[in-house]
Image: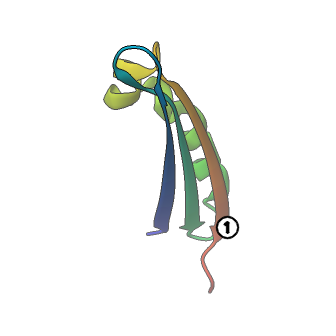
Amino acid sequence: MGTVVHTSRISIVREKGPTRITRIRVRYTLKAPAGKTADAREAMGTYLTRCPAAMSVRGCIAIEDTLDVSELDA
């Protein structure tokens, strides 16, 4: 099984009225088993459309994500 590390950044705006989250940036770093990096990239390309949390906010909060994937050392 691989190892996933992620870092998140959230952009917050305070104008007149309540404070709002306007953008969420997530960077995933994955060490995948040999031969599984393509599978990881494919999963990354589709997870936002199936993630309940993302589906709940994506109409009002921009979500940006990146994946840095490499193979585990043998």
Assess disc 1: are there few (<14), some (14-19) or many (≥20) residues with their C-alpha within 10 Å of its C-alpha. some
Colour mode of the rendering: rainbow
**x then y, percent, for residue 22:** 50, 26
**x then y, percent, for residue 12:** 47, 33
Measured along the vertical axis of the image, is residue 41 above or below residue 14? below
Q: Nearer the viewer, residue 26 or 22?
A: 22
Left or right, 53 with reference to 69? left
Measured along the vertical axis of the image, is residue 51 above or below residue 8? above
Number of marks in picture? 1
**x then y, percent, for residue 36:** 60, 59
Q: Nearer the viewer, residue 57 or 17?
A: 17
* Residue drawn where x is 64% and y is 46% of the image: 66
**x then y, percent, for residue 48:** 48, 30
Q: Which residue is mark 1?
A: 70
Q: Quadrant of residue 43?
A: top right
Mark 1 falls on what kind of element? strand
Q: Amino acid at mark 1?
A: Ser
Q: Quadrant location of the N terminus?
A: bottom left
Measured along the vertical axis of the image, is residue 65 above or below residue 19? below
Q: Nearer the viewer, residue 23 or 64?
A: 23
